[in-house]
Amino acid sequence: MSRRGTTAPAAVELRAIDKRFGSVHANRNVSLSVPAGTVHAIVGENGAGKSTLMRILYGYYRADAGEIHVGGAARQIRSTQDAIRAGIEMVHQHFMLVDTFTVLENVMLGAEHGALLKRGARRARAELTRLASEYGLRVDLEATVGELPVGVQQRIEILKALYRGAQVLILDEPTGVLTPQETELLFRVLKALRGRGVTVLLITHKLGEVMAISDEVSVMRDGRIVARRHTATTTEEELAELMVGRKVLLRVDKGPARPGATVLRVEGVSVRDRRGAERVRDVSFELRAGEIVGVAGVAGNGQTELLEALAGMLPVASGRIELLDTIIDQSAPRSPRELRRLGLAHVPEDRLRTGLVPQFDAADAAVLGYQGERAYGHLLLDRRALVADCLAMMTAFDVRPIDPLLSVSSFSGGNQQKLVLAREMHRAPRLLLVGQPTRGVDIGAIEYIHNRLIAMRDSGGAVLLVSVELDEIMSLSDRIMVMSGGCIVGEVPASEATERQLGMLMAGISSARTESAQIGTAH
Amino acid sequence: MTSSPATVPRWVPATLVPLANILLAFALSAVVIVLIGESPWQALKLLVLGAFGNSEAVGYTLYYATNLIFTGLAVAVAFHAGLFNIGGEGQAYIGGLGVGLVCLALDDTLPGIVLIPLCVLSGALFGAAWAIVPAYLQATRGSHIVITTIMFNFIASALMVYLLVNVLIDPGQMSPETREFRASAALPYVHELLRAAGVPLATSPLNLAFVLALLCCGGVWFVLWRTRLGYAIRTVGFNPSAAIYAGIDPARTVILAMSISGALAGLVGVNEILGVQRRLLLDFVAGYGFTGIAVSLMGRNHPLGIILAALLFGALFQGGAELSFEMPTITREMVVVIQGLTILFCGALEFMTRPYVENLYRRLAS
């Protein structure tokens, strides 16, 4: 596309970068040269070293060996300040914005130009207006950042980077929190940036997006760059295979569902979070044995609270839940322990903050929630029973290494997740609540986890699946519900669902049929 | 993979790092001793001999360690529930009150074999009660337990002064103390028991409370790592939202953990009041509650580590007293400086030497 001739120096060149963290060799002799004005995607599994490489470029870490060249000249990048001075900016997965500041104040942060704000503010306003019109990054400069949707917050991060004169923009998993429409808008902005000579480095694990936006793609595995391809000449399948090092099935193989009796009936349920804000509003649905119902939605639209209320972690503010023959409502709340006894299992969205205790050994963690069971002893906890059960779970779910005495934090994200799934699926529950089952999990483990969920459905279990990964929802679910603003705004059979239709529901556009509605200005 | 050992075994940070910290503290103390013109070698010799040189010295060292084991365990149990119990001082004080009240009320009527267990129970209950109020406030109202337990230390102190001056004082006496307990209400001294068994031992305040302290160490280990309650305490301490997820009630667990913590601190009263003083008096806790924090930190909140740390601090107390006695230029305050340096390096700067020790280990091991 707008690639320059081979004589022009690369915008960024990393030469023989090497980095170790203790015993972990995160980057091994990595060299990467990215031409100016291109979008370069870096893909790889968790722990492949892509984030480390970008953090070295952005000055978070210092490489043990190797050189960084920016615009043809060698640069010492010892801190993020050095990186910013060299024209390198990074937009993080978690935004670095002050929620109570306005957009303008956030952009000025760190570039106030003097002790009094007035002059700097005038300058920033003029420059931002110019940037906004040039790149189509329209934002209300006076709005308070905390009140804006995440898609807009991300736009502010990009504006901030451009305001500080970014020539190289690093984006770390930028689409994780966006609706498909917001993603589309982001890509439009990235294309505009590329057209004006800005170089974009994109860390992602979504291969579809790599194909949609990048000019070239580098694949990392075990700290090395194992392949570099022109996007036009590769396929998703090839990239997945390069990432994992073996053939991967991207589509989930599953037969038609055979739904049985109703397991869960939710009627007009509202839920307030711990601060008292209503997060789930008048939600009703049914879930039957032998089916997977997916709940799609942008993170933070009530899915978390819905799951927690169903699992007994949050009280139901109004309405009622029927789990098999048991009625749960405001006057008859059930604790997570009672619900487990009724046949409910829960894989929480955030496994490290909720589903596991990182400091525990695997054996202790493998009974979390079931610690009261008689099988583990009467007054005392029977360690031998714990270890034996943990071993059985680890074998059944291929958790590696098989060592019940190892602390939870020493397992990789995928193996931690498999341990949680093993614990929750071990007792063949009637109803399984699953939140973000593959967040931060390697492709190989994703495949495995998906197959286990399908197997559970086929053996007559009911599964409620909450995920922000639309691909995952679409490939696993039999029916898909979409949540927006705490309400269920639509339900679609998975066989008829399209990404576009779900995306519009997620964005809160009530009727999926009004396709002419302004997609770009959703939010 | 690489040739150097990938991970450092767990015993390295657990043993070599505290050792390095102690050596650093002693090295710095040596510098201070040189500055005031004394020989650090001589001072070290006096300190060690003063703490372990004869059976009397050992007796004193173990007697101090007894108090520190109780308060160290108290801090550790609370810590495992994610709480910082600064109130060991007050809980120990009130625990002593519990011991004393039972003695004063019943030492005329009950034989020692019944009275002493009753006293132990009462000391633990009083200590627990003093810890439950801040725990309840923390669990239900979110009042920060560091603040409330500190305030409860002051309340305990004021309450004891009031009681001893106005209520419990032995009539016709100047100092605010109760009457002495009858002989039945005394925990036997270790030297008495061993002499009766034919082992001659110098007189020291070491009494059977030391055995109680060791039993408590075993008990704390068992409760924390082998019971459901301990599982709940550790879950709440590490990860409160995982506790809610697992159906564990954090408020109830916090209150239970703090009552165990307070009960352990209250047992200081058994050692001091029942074992040594044999009457109720002011200020017998003398800072053990606070030193217990350092003991627990240095012992990594593990009963075994707490025994070792309590021994170290007991030796510093006892050896330090001997040192200032033998070397007049090294005053009582100088000894406090040495103790302070030990606390600084082992507690506050606990992790400072860790990377160096681990690197050294890696280099030596490869």
Image: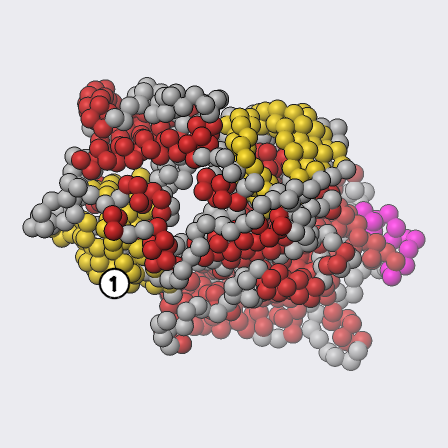
Residue A21, placed above or below residue A88: below
Q: Quadrant of the C terminus of chain A?
A: top left
Residue visible at 45% across and 68% down in the picture: B8
Q: Which residues are magenta?
A: B101-113
Query: On the picture, is B121 further left or further right than B158?
Result: right
Q: Quadrant of residue A113?
A: top left
Residue B258, placed above or below residue A186: below
User: Is residue B266 visible in the rendered structure shown here?
Assistant: no
Query: On the picture, is A247 further left or further right than B306?
Result: left
Nearest the viewer among B320 and A95 is A95
Nearest the viewer among A456 and B48 is A456
Residue visible at 77% across and 56% down in the picture: A374
Q: Which residue is mark 1?
A: A29
Label 1 is found on which chain of the structure? A
Q: Position of residue B288 (x, y in %)?
A: 61, 53
The dominant secondary structure in magenta is: helix
Colour logic:
secondary structure
User: Is residue A208 visible in the rendered structure shown here?
Assistant: yes
Nearest the viewer among B186 and A88 is A88
Task: Let me know if residue A451 is in the magenta part.
Answer: no
Residue visible at 74% across and 69% down in the picture: B190
Query: Quick one: label 1, few (<14), some, or many (20+) residues within 10 Å?
Result: some
Q: Position of residue A500 (x, y in %)?
A: 41, 32
